[in-house]
Each structure stands twice: as structure tokens, then as C-alpha cells.
Image (cartoon, helix red, strand yellow):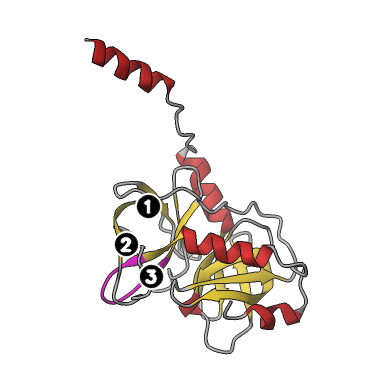
Amino acid sequence: MFAAGVAALLLLATPAVPTATPGTLRRALHAASVQIDPPGCSGVLAESNQIVVTARHCIDAGVQKLHVRFTNDVTRIAWVVASDEAADQAVLFLEDPVDVEPLPIVRRRQIPGTVLYFEGNPSRPRFQSARLDRIGRCPSLPDLPNALFTSIAGVPGDSGAPLVDVVAEVVGLVHGGARCHIATPADTLVRLVHRVLEQDDVHMTRGLGREHQGA
């Protein structure tokens, strides 16, 4: 009885994790999601209203400038300013900010079994919940030890799309892969984004794209 009472008190004392309503989460995810042209991959506005993150394999070698299309039909020119080949992640900097709320990138370590949410390419959104099955290494990204194995049902064009948690924080980006369907994790992504945001000249000249390519 005493143990049960202590457990009950601990549960009462533990602050509840805030959650977004399904409608709020879905609207936030859709508003921040983007399509990147070329090649038609996905991405998301994250941490800043001038930062878009996506999958590195979506960007052809030597390409430094892309067009980003938001779900409100606003388009922006974006420069490739940083990338992580091992994690298959890239950061784009918009020449002009957008009036869209960026999604934060999660700082918490993820736990297998967590429920995540996914929309895919915003030109054909398919909102769905997914499960984080496990965290490990996939042969398609051998230098990434903590790829996210999930139950999402992705299709071509979803690469770079965000997976978010219950408070609409970016947990990972879709990578895909023929041998295992994975997402790349937030810890490498947040470091990459912060390296860009910490630059003194982050308010951008075209030279910034060349300077940080491959950072």
C-alpha cells in the first residue's frame, strides 16, 4: 500500500508533457513543409524563417541554388549553405524570409516506441502517425550510427520530409533507402543548423552558399 501511494504521488508530481491537438499539429507541419525544385523533394522550415532543411541526396553535386515552394504558394530562392554527407542532411538559406512559423528541432534523445507524425511531400500530403521502431545503423548510411527506423509509408518525393513529435518538433528527416526505410536524426541536424546560424554573415550573400558547402 505504501509503495502504491508513493507511486501515485510521483505520478501526480511529474509534469505532463505538453501536446498539440491533432489539428494544430497537422496545420503547423503542413505550413512549414516545402517542396524543393528541382528535383521535387521535400523539406521543412526549421529554427528560423530563413532556414530550410532537407535530405542531402536530393541536391545534385555542384548545385548551389534551388527554388523552395511553400504550401501557401509562396516561392523563394534558396542557397545550399551546409551539408552533412554521413547524415544525408543539408541546410538551405532563403534569400528572403517567409511569414511562416518554423518548426523547432527536438533536443531530447528519442526513445523507441515513440509515436511520430509525418505528412510527406506537401504537394500530395498524406498525414499519418508512425512509430519509432528502433535506432541503429543502416547499410545505405554506414557512417551514421543512430538512424531512425520507423513505420512510415513513404513514396518517391518524400525524401527530406520531416518527422515530428507530439509538440511539432522535428525529430528527423526522411532518407528512405533500398535496404532499410529510415529517417536521419535531429542531433546531427541541429548541430548543422546552428553552425549556419552562428555565422557572423548569416544574413547572406551568394558567397555564403559557396563558403559553407560541405561544412
Query: Within 10 Å of the Cα at label 2, are there few (<14), some (14-19), or many (20+) other Cα atoms?
Result: some
105 displayed left or right of 155: right
Check residue 146 in the rendering and tell me which mark sits there, or answer none. Answer: none
Query: Within 10 Å of the Cα at label 3, are there few (<14), some (14-19), or many (20+) other Cα atoms?
Result: some
Residue linked to disc 2: 153
Q: Secondary structure at mark 3?
A: loop
Q: Secondary structure at mark 1?
A: strand
Residue linked to disc 1: 128
Of the 4 image quadrants, the one containing the C terminus is bottom right
Range drawn in magenta: 174-182
Looking at marks 1 and 2 on the same chain, the residue that comes earlier in the sequence is marked by 1
Which residue type does callout 2 highlight? Ala
Q: Is residue 6 visible?
A: yes
For image coordinates 68% across by 63% down, the residue present is 197
Distance, label 1 to label 2, CA atoms, is 9 Å
Which residue type does callout 1 highlight? Gln
Residue linked to disc 3: 144
Q: Secondary structure at mark 2?
A: loop
For image coordinates 55% across by 81% down, the residue present is 38
Looking at marks 2 and 3 on the same chain, the residue that comes earlier in the sequence is marked by 3
Q: Report the residue that reaches farthest toward the left.
A: 1
Can you give x and y, in whole percent of width and height, for residue 83 in the image? 55, 75
Q: Nearer the viewer, residue 95 or 86?
A: 86
For image coordinates 39% across by 74% down, the residue present is 156
Q: Report the residue that reaches farthest toward the bottom.
A: 62
Can you give x and y, in whole percent of width and height, for residue 100 in the image? 66, 54
Which residue type does callout 3 highlight? Leu
Can you give x and y, in whole percent of width and height, for residue 96 in the image? 75, 67
Looking at marks 3 and 1 on the same chain, the residue that comes earlier in the sequence is marked by 1
Q: Is residue 150 above or below residue 181?
A: above
Query: Within 10 Å of the Cα at label 1, are there few (<14), some (14-19), or many (20+) other Cα atoms?
Result: few
